[in-house]
Image (tube, rainbow, N blue to C red):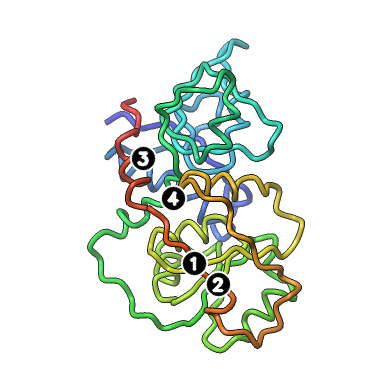
Amino acid sequence: MKPIRLYWWQGEGEHDANRRNFGDYLSPLIVAMISGRPVVYAPVETADMLAIGTILKRERQARRFLFPRRLHIWGSGAGNPDERFPARHHYHAVRGRHTLAAIKGGGNREVALGDPGLLVSHYWGGRPRPAKQHALGVIPHFVDQDTPAVRALLQIRGARLINVYASIDEVLRDVLSCTHVISSSLHGLIVSDAFNVPNRRIVISGNIRSNLKFADYYSAYGLDEPAPLAGQAVSGNEHPEDLVGNYQKRDVDKLCADLVRSFPQL
């Protein structure tokens, strides 16, 4: 069976398996699950497809003999408001409405919206879900891990640190074991939504490269981005439900159905 050549952001995980950000490495897992085919990493120059991640700007590297190539795009997103993407690619799904609007000429309005990371609920499938053991899961982006805000959150009774460098199964199991989640990682929020765990974004530092990606993700539901929690406002004495606030349930099932339906036939 011919493998799918997929590009995903490897980061330091390319050389160190202990530094693989779970959100980026969801991409080969989910693509293999939905396609039923093996998936191999490929640089954009030779890839067939881009999927999960704020990686759509990499499309400019898709060239053969200096001539532009077409890629299959399934769920990738924009990182900045000024990014624009050529219409030549096969756009099957993009992360949200902001990315769709950045496709020159408006793109194909039949493009599905949503982050394929939501399909972790399909990946977990019929496996037993762990009991709720923790009142609050704390998922800092890797740039935020060693910060006063994270240390304050972990002072809350029942709080558990969820490491984005842990294995995907470990991260999913930890999220399922929590009653609430606070995350500065986008895919921490996405996985929590997939498992219907009330969650809220926390802004801890200015080191996360893209703020647009959060608004882009929520736009797929037709929602404005919920107001994030300010890291400097956390004392460690809060109740988890007060930190999360009024969580609005997302229509995850619709987005998942659209993503599965739109998967390209490569």
* Quarter of the figure with residue 265: top left
What is the secondary structure assignment of the residue under circle 2?
A: helix
Residue named by callout 1 = 247
Q: In the image, what residue occupies the spot 42% across and 56% down?
A: 250
- Residue 249, given in percent of the width and then of the height, sits at 42, 61
| Residue type indicated by callout 2 | Val
| First along the sequence among labels 1 and 3 | 1
Q: Nearer the viewer, mark 3 or mark 2?
A: 2
Closest to the observer, 217 or 62: 217
* Left or right placement of residue 246 versus residue 196 in this view: right
Mark 2 surroundings: few (<14), some (14-19) or many (≥20) residues within 10 A: some
Distance, label 3 to label 2, CA atoms, is 28 Å
What is the secondary structure assignment of the residue under circle 4?
A: helix
The N terminus - image quarter: top left
Distance, label 1 to label 2, CA atoms, is 7 Å
| Residue type indicated by callout 3 | Leu
Residue named by callout 3 = 259
Distance, label 4 to label 3, CA atoms, is 10 Å
What is the secondary structure assignment of the residue under circle 3?
A: helix
| First along the sequence among labels 4 and 3 | 4
| Residue type indicated by callout 4 | Gly
Note whether 87 is above or below 152 in the view shown: above
Mark 1 surroundings: few (<14), some (14-19) or many (≥20) residues within 10 A: few
Q: Nearer the viewer, mark 4 or mark 1?
A: 1
Mark 3 surroundings: few (<14), some (14-19) or many (≥20) residues within 10 A: many
| First along the sequence among labels 3 and 2 | 2
| First along the sequence among labels 4 and 1 | 4
